[in-house]
Image (cartoon, grey):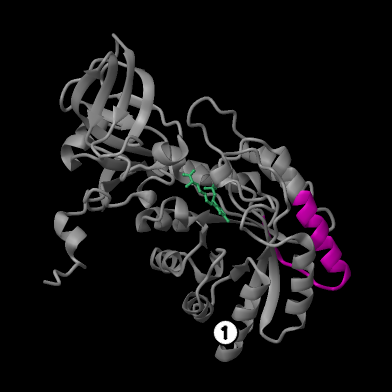
Amino acid sequence: MIDFKALAQKYDTPLYIYDFGRITAQYEKLKKAFSGRKSLISYAVKANSNLSVIGHLAELGAGADCVSIGEVRRALMAGVPKYKIIFSGVGKRDDEIEEALKNDILLLNLESEAEMDRVEAIARNLGQKARISIRVNPNIDPKTHPYISTGLHENKFGVDIETAKRMYIRANQSDHLDPVGIHFHIGSQLTELDPIKEASMIVADLVRSLLAIKIELKFFDVGGGLGIVYDKETTIEPYDYAQAILGTLHGLDVTVICEPGRFMVGNAGWFLTRVLYEKVNEGKRFIVVDGAMNDLLRPSLYDAYHKVEVVGKSGGETPADVVGPVCESGDFFAKNRPLPPTEHGDVVVVHSAGAYGFVMASNYNTRPRPAEVAIVEGKDRCIRQRETFEDLVRLEKMCL
Ligand code: LLP
């Protein structure tokens, strides 16, 4: 049991807490599900890019799925071997491509023909052969929130099957491109297996048709997206997930890569905030806390559900909105939740905050971002200090 009250006292609030033991358990579950097959769990750094989090996963053997050169640098800094780093993303700049090639990472995942031309030109300038994969858009509805659904043609991601085939044929003839992999990612917070299976089948068919023309891919990257329980969702078991994918790979000798973010860290993290005031407006109850949408954006942005608890209190629950001090009506963590009466200083825990929490935080309303604390073998360690006002204005200059 984590003593949230003691941590709030020691580190102040708002605060992020991560249990590294839980991260380990998630990694092991997924790795085990793919055992018996060559596989690489490439952690989607975007979910939580704290160096200690990446470093912990690297120690367990994970690679890193990165979407900016900044994330690639973090992965390298945190000790992920370069041959386990993937660089994806729909809009890579020339300087990012160049740095990734110079770092000799595992591969660049391409999302358009135009991008392939850039990568080829930059690799030629460097006298290199760039290892690439192509992100295929299998046109599958993943049945998740529209903002985090990516596998339909109406989304900006990847290329269609025919374009991909043409790109592989061209890449295979180039002196500066080495097509080694294929990739798809249909969305995030997936709770249904069928769309994943269907996408995997479509992409595996393409890999087989490439093999028939002597283009032999080594890496089959199934993206991320495994959902977690926030409320009462039924989630996909890692074993079933692996079986569904492996079942589509007959006739192929490929290393399966998967890029989980949320699954690894989502339920290993909590956000702590303290009650400032309670108030009632015409019968509607509000609990005003010291954390806000700038610290944890998911409820405001996606209307996402996060379980909320008042530490050490129960009984006398009535519906309340838990809201922050930011001047926006969208600044809330929970709406109409049965919560006990609270007092100034009570600690409120927001659950499932390990993924897309701190990384999406901002300084809106000139609010310093929270500190981050890791629980490692029962001990708490600060892995990112709370920002200060001075941090926030450091890069600004008065021009008058
Ligand atoms: N691979 C690719 C290509 C991705 O685009 C993503 C997430 C992942 C892997 C990792 O997905 P995961 O396993 O974490 O579901 N901010 C949103 C989630 C955005 C996900 C973007 N892409 C949220 O808070 O729900």
Residue type at the position of mark 1:
Ile
Residue at the far left: name it.
400
Residue 103, percent from left and from top: 49, 77
Q: Residue at x 79, y 71 (%)?
A: 166
Q: Does 116 appear above or below 363?
A: below
Quadrant of the image for the N terminus? top left
Count the labels in the image: 1
Where 169 falls versus 350 (above or below)? below
Q: Residues within 10 Å of mark 1 (few under 14, many from 20)?
A: many
Start-end of magenta stretch: 200-221
371 displayed left or right of 133? left
The quadrant the C terminus occupies is bottom left
Q: Is residue 243 visible?
A: no
The residue shown at (35%, 48%) is 358
Horizontal side, residue 169 vs residue 182: left or right: right
Q: In this view of the protein, which residue sits in the foreground, 21 or 385?
A: 385
Please state the horizontal and vertical placement of residue 13, each as a whole percent of the image: 21, 39
Q: Work out which residue is located at the far right of the displayed protein and give it.
A: 212
Which image quadrant is residue 309 in? top left
Res 189 quadrant in image = top right
Image vertical order of residue 27 relative to residue 110, above or below? above
Give the answer, above or below, for where 270 lies relative to 162.
above
Q: Residue at x 84, y 61 (%)?
A: 208
Quarter of the figure with residue 132: bottom right
Tell me residue 97's x, y (percent). 52, 76
Q: Is residue 157 visible?
A: yes
Q: Residue furthest top?
A: 316
Q: Which residue is mark 1?
A: 122
Q: Magenta segment: does it hold 214?
A: yes
Question: How far from the left and from the top, in percent, is residue 245?
Answer: 73, 47
> Callout 1: helix, strand or loop?
helix
Q: Is residue 205 magenta?
A: yes
